[in-house]
Image (cartoon, rainbow, N blue to C red):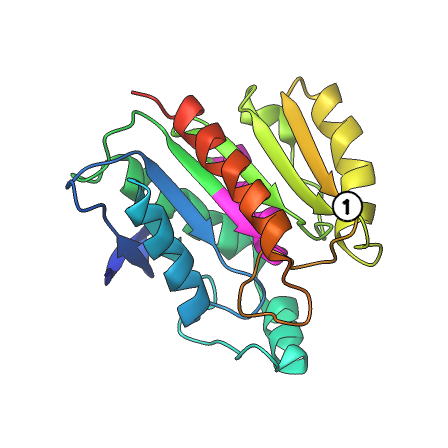
Amino acid sequence: MGTMVEFKSNGGTASGYLASPASGKGPGVIVIQEYWGLIPQVKGTADMFAREGFNALAPDFYHGKSAQIGEPDKAGKLMMELDLEQAAKDAKGAARFLASHANTSSKKVGVIGFCMGGMLALVTGTVASDVVGAVVDCYGVPPRKKPSYAAMKGTPVLGIFAGKDESMGLPALRDLEPDLKAAGVPFEKVIYKDADHAFLNEQRRDVHRPDDAKDAWGRIIPFLKKHLAS
């Protein structure tokens, strides 16, 4: 449905998967990978957003490297090797590219990320607040270095978390919520009490919860459409 594209990133280039709506134009949304990388599941999520009328870009933060679902050791190594300063530059480049893209109808773009990507979605909101109008953090992991949330300049954030995610998402949430409040960032959260980490990933049969996922997507899509209305 989509195609690979290149965009500028701090004097260099980065790449990503772009899926545009059948109508030709739609609000822009950046889709940020889990720690596996830019795998087909992430591209499929971008395709889903395109079917919902969005112009969706999934940047490749690992620059060509990836791990398959079921290879957590390899994925963990890739995540630990991620240069967060370069990732922030790539995120800023992706946001600016998408905001100015011919198929983007909104003045600002949204950002959604999962697991590692949830943290990077928040980072994107801090480094590109001029072009980011909404952020969705899906069970994001704690950042190695806390972003300056005040730099988001009031960009609204929706948090999707799992009640059984005590190893990653919930510890991050306990720090995130007061930090966003102190920075004056509007924040709303939904916690699915019987769900565990990565429950939105339809290819993770060990944790995927279809009913909770359906409810979550029923909140995420309207949230982004509301805040990205032209």
* Depth check, front residue: 217 or 173: 217
- Left or right of 181? Residue 226 is left
The quadrant in which residue 92 appears is: top left
Reply above or below: 17 against 152: below
Q: Residues within 10 Å of mark 1 (few under 14, many from 20)?
A: some
> Is the magenta region chiefly helix, strand or loop?
helix
- Left or right of 99? Residue 195 is right
Measured as percent of width and height from the top left, residue 69 is found at: 56, 77
Residue 110 is one of the magenta-drawn residues: no
Split into 4 quadrants, where in the image is the N terminus?
Answer: bottom left
Question: Which element type, helix, strand or loop, lies under badge 1?
Answer: helix
Reply above or below: 205 against 222: below
Q: Is residue 10 visible?
A: no
Measured as percent of width and height from the top left, residue 129 is found at: 47, 28
Reply above or below: 183 against 48: above
Residue identifier under label 1: 172
Q: Is residue 46 visible?
A: yes
Name the residue at 33% across, 56% down.
Answer: 47
Residue interval drawn in magenta: 112-127
Name the residue at 70% across, 53% down.
Answer: 141
* Depth check, front residue: 117 or 204: 204
Residue 121 is one of the magenta-drawn residues: yes
Measured as percent of width and height from the top left, residue 98 is found at: 29, 42
Measured as percent of width and height from the top left, residue 200 is found at: 58, 55
Split into 4 quadrants, where in the image is the C terminus?
Answer: top left
Residue type beneath disc 1: Ala
Name the residue at 66% across, 49% down.
Answer: 140
